[in-house]
Image (cartoon, rainbow, N blue to C red):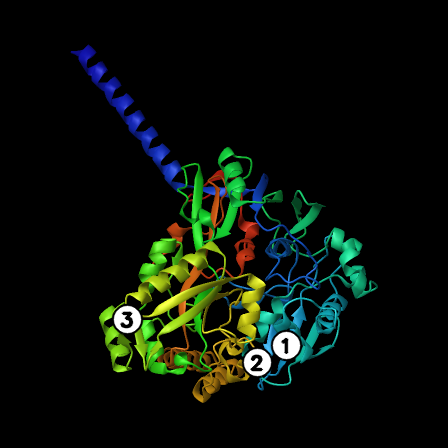
Amino acid sequence: MARRIRWQILIAFVSCTFVLALMSYLAITTAAIQRPVEGGDYVEALLDAPTQINPLIGDPSIDQGAADVQALIFDGLVRLSADGVPESALATSWIVDETGEVYTFVLRDGVRWHDGQPLTMNDVLFTIRAIQGPAFAGNPSLRAIWRASIVDAIDEHTLIVRLGSPFAPFLKYATFPILPSHLLADVSPEQWASSGFAQKPIGTGPYQIDQLSAERVLLRANPEYYRGRPFIDSIELRPYNSSQAALNDLLRGTIQGLSFTSTNDLRNFNVPRALHRFSAPLDGYTMLTFNLREGPLADLGLRRALAAGLDRDALVNTIFGKSAAVIDTPILPQWWAAAPEIGWYPFGQDRAATLLDDLGYIRNVTGMRSRDGVPLAFELITDGSSDRQATAQEIARQWALIGVSVSIITLEPDALQQRLSDHQFSMAIHSWQRLGGDPDIYELWHSDQADSGRNYAGLRDSEIDTLINRARTDSDSDIRIGAYTAFQRRWIDLAPSIVLYQPLLISITSTALGGLATDDAATPESPQPLMIGREGRFRDVIHWYLRSAREIRGDLREP
């Protein structure tokens, strides 16, 4: 009997010990989190080799590789948050006066260049004067804004910018990289491209250049970065001549990351388990622009019929799958001014055919339409990129079903741009890129831009002009939102063009890389934020990590 009791006690003891151990294990593992630690080297493919990293003599819109490097080594007075709202960078704060014309910036203390020299107001003044000067070769809109401004330093920490007239989107132009005057002020603009700075640019950003060659750009973590040292010790950007070659090295583990837009042929690549794929919408879109100046497309009724006869959802699904998004207006869905309740014309071939019948466009024996003996036929110009060619062919196919003939003319990119600028087209497929975080669409749709600007459609409408002017001059956010909402309604009513799709930036990385935003974090209520330029993937690079340690979190108290 006693022996039996001893066995029962032993079994009970072992069982209790096991249960206690199991509960302790579960408590530790469920309360532990991954804590990033410093270390590791990250290698990413670069599909566009940088040409000129000095932003004063290069244009990031045509030199994406340079934009990627610039995002890692430079800072502006202002940076943009994930939702496009300006936040502090080299300027800790700013004040806008009651007129909306005067901005006062306060420069951050304690910032140093990668060579150890302190950031000063001279650096800020030099950079702005260089943008205002004749040698600046970057964004023409940026140059125009700063040339119209008067800039003064009140003291070594305070900068005053007088615009001359209210301009609500001004802060997005204050994101331009600040450059070191101690390295460039005594160098003539003609020598900027061959200077020592061009060979090894110096910035204040999270990473500093260690090696710069045609084979790679090697960057080391900046231990003195004002936002905190990055976790990853080094980042190497390795240029590739083809996206397929880069993908092959990614699969072999030679590199750890690859990013490209959804127009790339790799967009439908099935990612293996060893890799992770995530995507985010880019600040741009591809559109079908109508020339409203003369000919049949000056007729609003015809434009509405064509809009009804184009199934954009089918077009995007056929060509891109889930790698691009259908959008309805020139105001991107991720901008704070978006009005999701305002939609484009619903697709309906029968309704489109009825509208064309009512306009007097009658089908002949071939099924094509004409009016007064003139065929309803258009030339559609675009460039030779595979995605735009596929888009043009799908548009032609769909409109042929309602009796509209479309012939596709393929041009070199420069020739396409020239035809758009000269207004020598009926229809064109082209893209707007790098629109930024503020929905200022003055250059694209204001009447003042119809003759010599980028309002290629030639839209002239006093109501549109009034709304655009109100949205870009009043600093009150509610007024701006109201103006852009009304703009979208009016724009859709006039149907001057058809916005086709918004591309995505697709990144494929090793699962070892942490600290990135992922698709898993996006929900219908909180979608992926806008990626402002492809280099926007580096916006929070200081949070990326390759190494981590488990850390127990909970309510335990130290004695």
Query: Quadrant location of the N terminus?
Result: top left
Does label 2 or label 1 sit earlier along the sequence? 1
Task: Inspect this view and state whether residue 110 appears.
Answer: yes
Above/below status of 70 relative to 253: below
- Mark sitting earlier along the chain (2/3): 2
Amino acid at pointer 1: Ile
Residue occupied by mark 1: 145
How far across and how far down the image is residue 406, in percent?
38, 67
Identify the secondary structure beneath mark 1: helix
CA neighbours of label 1 inside 10 A, class few (<14), some (14 to 19), many (20+): some
Residue highlighted by disc 2: 167
Q: Residue under label 3, please give it.
A: 346
Q: CA distance from mark 3 to mark 1?
A: 39 Å
- Number of numbered callouts drawn: 3
Q: Is disc 3 surrounded by few (<14), some (14 to 19) or many (20+) residues within 10 Å?
A: few
Dot 2 crowding, Cα within 10 Å, few <14, some 14–19, many 20+: many
Q: Does residue 227 lie above or below 343 as drawn?
A: above
Q: For marks 2 and 3, give the one nearer the viewer.
A: 3
